[in-house]
Each structure stands twice: as structure tokens, then as C-alpha cells.
Amino acid sequence: MQIKILAFGIAKDIFGSANINVELRNNAKAEELKDLLEEKYPKLKQLASYMLAINNEYAQNDSPISITDEVAVIPPVSGG
Amino acid sequence: MDTQIEISSEPLKTQACIDWVMSPQCGGIDIFIGTVRNATNGKNVVKLEFEAYEPMAIKEMEKIAEQAFKKWQVQKILVHHRTGILEIGDIPVIIAVASAHRDAAFDACRYIINTLKQTVPIWKKEIFEDGEVWVAAHP
């Protein structure tokens, strides 16, 4: 399945775009997506940390991703 | 218990925030106003840029307000956050809390701004004369 990934902050700079499309197996876990993204964009590994969000909630490594989900890369936040 | 949470690209209005939390049951209002500082680690900052993942940021701020209502006896909570380019002295964030007694308002206000900085998906870019950096991105 093809998933659109939203990117914010420094993740947007790393991807060179506010969103990218990634090919992922059905019901892949968040951890697999992280591995895949880090392989394609090694600079992600240099960040202090980053999370994935699925449908506006922080994801755990074992959270499943389905084709209708809104997925986002959340680099370290710095609001306020 | 009443909450007002907003993300806006327009300048934040301090007086309107105070007016909104005012209520006859409350003996006090605690307000935190973040302002853009002209330097970080001794380096001059020209301006800041704030970006938000808006639907998730609103959701996370709602969670923080809910937690604050559970922890303290407060009546009203307001959280407004700005996005876009901000100049020195501009206001990126306003937190206002009203409660019957002051201790709850002080404690809740501090909790809300501290937690917002840890969990709400909003990002700040510092723009210097000779470059720019996303705050906290790298160790």
C-alpha cells in the first residue's frame, strides 16, 4: 500500500518536501516505517529523537498503519 | 470547567485572553505570556518562525487542559499559540488560567506551559543573521 507521510519542522527539510509517499506492506507497524524512512533519509538518525503520529496521536513502535491513516513524522517539538 | 484553545497566524490579543478567563467565581487569574527574545546562547536572533501540525497540536493542548482540570481546582483554561514569522517582542503563546484561589491557578499555568513545550507538535526555527536552526532538533 502507498502511504502519504506528512513532515514538519526539520523533517520537512530532510525530506525536501512537506509530504512524501512511501510504499509499505499492509498493516505494517510504525517501527517498520521508521526503519524504512531512516534507510531512505539517514539524517533522521541524527535527530535528538523523533516520533510518528497516526491519526493525530503519538504512535508506539508496534502501532499498526493502514491505508486510510494520516501518518506524520514528529521531530523534537519546540513550541511555546 | 471551560476551555478555549486556538492556533492562529494572527497576532495574539492579551486583553481578549484575560477577558475570556474572567469569571465571577474566580478570585484570580494567572497568565503566562511568552515573548520572542533577541538572543539565544549569546547569539543574536533576528526572528522566529513557528510551525504547527494544527489538528494534532489542538488535540494535545486539549489533553493538557483536561489533565490540569483533573489535578487542580481551576475554572477556566485558555491556550493560544501563534504560527508564522515572529519578530523580537512578539507573543508566540498565551496561557491564562482562572480559579477560585491563586495556588491552583499558578500551579496549573506552570504545568500547562511546561507540558506544552514537551508534547505539543509545534516547532520553532531561530533565524540568525548568518543562518537558521530548528530548535531542539539535534542533540
Image (cartoon, coloured by chain):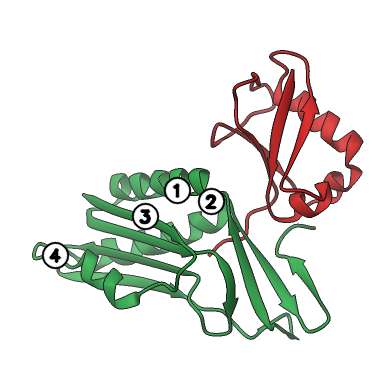
| Dot 3: element | strand
Subunit under mark 1: B
Q: Chain of mark 4?
A: B
| Above or below: residue A59 compared with residue A47 | above
> What percent of the width, then of the height, locates residue B51?
60, 59
**Residue B113, relative to residue B43: is it above or below?**
above
The quarter of the picture where residue A65 lies is top right
Sooner in the amino-acid sequence: mark 3 or mark 1? 3
The numbered mark, 4 or 2, whose residue comes first in the sequence reads 4
Circle 1 sits in a helix, a strand or a loop, which is it?
helix
Distance CA(mark 4)–CA(mark 2): 28 Å
Q: Using the image as rendered, state which of residue B104 and residue A44 is in the foreground.
A: A44
B112 with respect to A68 (left or right): left
Which residue is found at the position 27% from the left and 61% from the top?
A: B104
Left or right: where does residue B98 sit relative to residue A61?
A: left
Residue lying at 50% horizontally and 60% vertically, measured from the top left = B114
Residue carrying label 2: B120
Label annotation for residue B85: none
The answer as to whether the residues below labels 4 and 2 share one chain is yes
Check if mark 3's residue and mark 1's residue have beta carbons within 8 Å: yes
The residue pinned by badge 1 equals: B58
At numbered mark 2, what does the secondary structure look like: helix, strand or loop? loop
Task: Report the disc number at residue B5.
Answer: 3
Q: Nearer the viewer, mark 4 or mark 1?
A: 1
N-terminal of the pair, mark 3 or mark 2, is 3
Q: CA distance from mark 3 to mark 2?
A: 12 Å
Q: Earlier in the sequence, mark 2 or mark 1?
A: 1
The image position of residue B97, as x and y in percent, is 29, 63
Task: Tell me the residue that label 4 is attached to.
Answer: B23
| Mark nearer the N terminus (3 vs 4) | 3
